[in-house]
Image: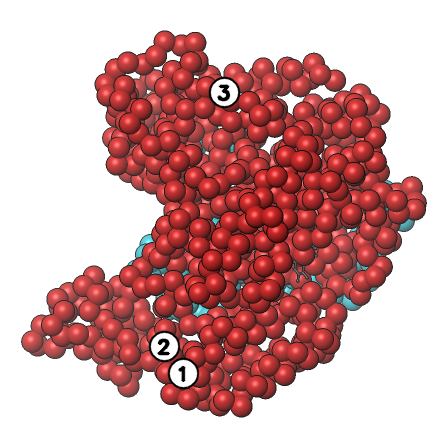
Amino acid sequence: MNHILEELRETGRATLYPGKTKISIGLATCGRAAGADRVYEAVCRFLAERSLDWTVTQVGCLGFCTKEPLVMVHVPGNPRFVYGPVNPDDVSQFLEFTLAGRVEGELLLGRIDEDYNLMLDEKVSLLDSGVQKDSRGDREGWEELPLLSEIPFYRRQVRVALRNCGLIDPFSLAEYVARGGYQALALVLKEMTPEDVVDLVFDSGLRGRGGAGFLTGRKWAAARSAPGPVKYLVCNADEGDPGAYMDRSILEGDPFSVLEGMTIGAYAIGAKEGYIYVRDEYPLAVATFQEAVRQAEGNGLLGENIFDTGFTFRVHLVRGAGAFVCGEETALLASIEGSRGEPRPRPPYPVEKGLWGRPTCINNVETWASVPPIVCRGPAWYRALCWSPRASAGTKVFSVVGQVKHTGLVEVPLGVTLSEIVHEIAGGPRGGVGIKAVQTGGPSGGCIPASMFHLPVDFETLTEAGSIMGSGGFVVMDEATCMVDIARYFLEFTLGESCGKCSTCREGLLQMHHLLEKITQGEGTVADLSTLRELAWLVREGSLCGLGKTAPNPVLSTLNHFRDEYLAHVREKRCPAGVCRALISFYIVQEECTGCQTCLEECLAGAISFHSDGYCLIDEEKCVKCGTCADVCPAGAVRCR
Amino acid sequence: MSDLKSDDLLKKSEANPAGVQGLSGEVSERLPGGAVLEALFSLQRREGYLSEEGLSYLSSQLGIPLSQIYGVATFYNAFSLVPRGRHQVCVCYGTACHVRGARSILERLERELGVKSGETTPDRKFSLHLVRCVGSCSLAPVVMVDGRVRGRLKVDQIPQLLIGYE
Ligand SMILES: Cc1cc2nc3c(=O)[nH]c(=O)nc-3n(C[C@H](O)[C@H](O)[C@H](O)COP(=O)(O)O)c2cc1C
Ligand code: FES
């Protein structure tokens, strides 16, 4: 079996380190949304015009999404320089710099001197590539430039699930193998019994990364020992938490890691067939994974007789059709079977009765992607990755988004504090106002106030703080975010996504939403706040699945931590954050208005007029309080009260 | 110009959806996993929506009752039982986008297109939808037009976003 891997490894090395100048561009969905596809075209055009024999390749997302489009330049014998944001219009100027042997200091995020191969715990130096060192220009002085791994965004990160994202071409099985891919599967099939594998994963302490945090080894053991000849394995890539996108990033940036993890899992539990359920909103993830399946099959790493060991495993891809509740495991299985995606009571759990009544092991994308390194490096290594004695093993990817300077995907050892993520990694507040809270766990989670940012991030601590870790959504909110409106927003979400099976969920959430609407309209009373609590209890106790059971969380956590804001709404009819439209009004500060009339052109209500003295005025009667004028005013003269 | 492998694959996966091959009856006891969803997707791709005739046809082809197909089709947000526009404009209403001003983006789009979310312009050019997160949360607020995501939007960039569609 080793010669397949050996060949692939050689091919992969040759494309990873082509021995000539290489430009890599982050072309995952987030990169494209920032214009990376146009950057790619501009780079190709430049190289064609100059007849330069350089390599241009696409990679997934490096995680530092605020700086997208990200471009990496590697001239053999030099560090790899990471730049961003590279504007498509500035590409030629940027490449001229590279051509002249210089470093574009303005855009430089950091340099990479060596690639770390996590699977083999090996370092590959980029500096001694055997090719003569480029000594033109001032690239010589690179020792002064910061290392990417030491800038605040990356310093605390340990990339396990994201080990290859942004560093390899996701369409190249060879590059995956060159970075230690399929080493774990080879080891498992050659030297381990299925029981060994289950024990190893159990020992590692790995807990599911999809939300509930169930011990993965325990789930596998149950699936392994469930009776019957036919078992299934499922990868949950429905990623429903709005604000979380690590699963997409892994599927688009390193699909083989998930595939290898699933194949190892299949061997461990005794499944011959697996499904991956990917949400329809992720077309690129679907296409990338399908290609990965094709390549793995083509190279004997998937399908019949894998590695000539007689072991067989096939993977089918199913596209979800836009229903949040289908992320819940029993609903997901119903959806694959072709029914409405409605949850059913557990037990029986899917490991006993899953797809078509057969034992089924279902895990999240990030969970699967973490399996190969755990196998290669061993359970003790994984357990030791966390930072606090209380935290569970390993690392977790968070999508740090919202009102911080540096948004992106961040993989940290469990046990780092909220403050470290918000203030150090993400660089603190982005606007002029302070940070108020962070929302974790999506619609099932809650808001944690800034006063609790000293807490470490792990499953138990976040639950005690009234939220949950969930799948890793981490939405930072500042003083301009209204917590009552956030509670209303989440209820609107869960109300829309409730499948309607349980009346407590269907009707209870509707009533809670009514109350919150009322409060944001300025018509609420203090008594409504206690009614909200009662209803929250009712919905939680009376609903069948996790959706209903956790839907009240955003309301309860904001009621607990931000009661002041609720009281301002009901008592003073005031929205302190300036969000709830019924309670605010906009005005223009005459002295600051330059008379440019941008607001007047953009006002959809026609509520703005131009005064002959050279400033604009808002007619409160006509104003619909959309806030567009405040957004577009170049002078910042529009205020809200 | 662009010779991106991923672009290629995106087109291919649109043109020839995986899974539909399994529908022709060689599966004896049960349909393959995901077959019903895939069939609905390809019907919608062909006709722009799920027509009544289309659904009856699927029901007979798949050998499952029309009521069940109907139940599935109405359960999911991705399917439409009424004709849609030629281009799908999806405003992300996920948490990150909400916090960063998705509401103003939506309102501006509603004004530009003259329709509310869930509706189609009279010339059938655009349908406007709300979606819950397209996974580019770090570039919020975002809008997706026909599967292509544009991020870091400002309200006054909206008109420009709609240019170039037929
Ligand atoms: C309403 C609801 C939505 C869920 N959505 C997801 C999801 O989008 N992705 C996911 O992996 N798990 C989701 N889960 C959790 C799954 O039910 C299941 O626990 C998980 O896929 C198991 O994988 P893990 O052990 O690897 O985390 C959801 C649960 C509930 C109750
Ligand atoms: S919240 Fe809008 S893309 Fe995720």
The numbered mark, 2 or 3, whose residue comes first in the sequence reads: 3
Dot 2 amino acid type: Pro
**Considering only vertical position in the picture, is A519 above or below A335?**
below
- Mark 2 surroundings: few (<14), some (14-19) or many (≥20) residues within 10 A: many
The colour assigned to chain B within the rendered structure: cyan
**Disc 2, ligand 2: is the CB inside 8 Å?**
no
Q: Which residue is mark 2?
A: A576
Q: Residue furthest right?
A: A228
- x, y percentage for residue A84? 35, 38
- x, y percentage for residue A106? 26, 36
Res. A124 mark: 3
- x, y percentage for residue A542? 73, 76
Q: Residue furthest front?
A: A389
- Residue that appears at 45% across and 51% down: A421
Is B57 in front, or is A626? A626
Residues at marks 2 and 1, CA–CA distance in whole angstroms: 7 Å
Q: Is residue A337 left or right of residue A59?
A: right
Tell me whether circle 2 and circle 1 mark residues in contact (CB < 8 Å).
Answer: yes
Quarter for ligand 1?
bottom right
- Give SS at disc 1: helix
- Mark 1 surroundings: few (<14), some (14-19) or many (≥20) residues within 10 A: some
What is the quadrant of the C terminus of chain A in the image?
Answer: bottom left
Dot 1 amino acid type: Ala
Is B4 in front, or is A494? A494
The lab-note entry on whether marks 1 and 3 share a chain reads yes
Q: Which residue is mark 1?
A: A568
What is the quadrant of the N terminus of chain A in the image?
Answer: top right
The colour assigned to chain A within the rendered structure: red
Dot 3 amino acid type: Val
